[in-house]
Image (spheres, helix red, strand yellow):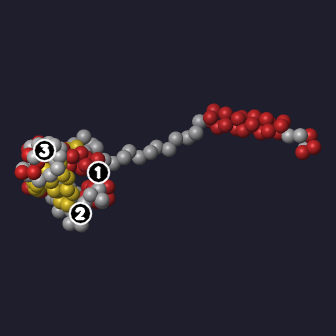
Amino acid sequence: MLEVQLDDGTSLVIPEDEISFSASRGSGPGGQHVNVTASRVTVRFNVLHSAVLDRRQKERIASRLASRISSAGELAVSCADGRSQHANRRTALQRLAALLTHALHTPRPRTKTKTPAAQKRKRLDDKKKRALTKRNRRSISDI
């Protein structure tokens, strides 16, 4: 079971049967231990065939994580940070949850603000002052 936090404060629970795990030998800490144990864990989640996500969420994830999703619609996250498969599995799940949370985040729309009148006045006054300074630098024959 994987819990993904949404913007509205609710959470999305992805059941264990929609997530697949595979272990392989990987590089990382452990010295010779790495060469004989399958401690790297790859977590796969098929975004396109998920029953938990609605169409809009699938489209948002597919567009935001397009470079990380395979042509079959699978999002894969690997972890080989720790020495144990169990620790790497937990870390990979956390990374998957963070990726999905980030992808499902909807940015708040920008509210247009009006430039204050005092700021407009100051800008025009500065322009007039600068123009006067430049005009005073001219020689008399240019006028």
Residue 3 position (above or below residue 136): below
Residue 74 placement (x, y as % from top left): 20, 60
Spatial CA distance of label 1 from label 3 is 36 Å
Reading the chain from its start, which is encountered first: label 2 or label 3? 3
Which residue is the site of mark 1? 103
Callout 3 secondary element: loop
Q: Amino acid at mark 1?
A: Ala
Give the mark nearest the N terminus, 1 or 2: 2
Q: How many marks?
A: 3
x and y, in percent, of residue 84 in the image = 9, 43
Query: Which amino acid, mark 2?
Result: Ser
The residue lying at 17 percent from left, 56 percent from top is: 45
Res. 3 visible in picture: no
What residue sits 58% from the left and 39% below the top? 115
Where is residue 88, by image quadrant? top left
**Is residue 86 left or right of 137 when viewed as pictured?**
left
The picture quadrant where one finds residue 3 is: top left
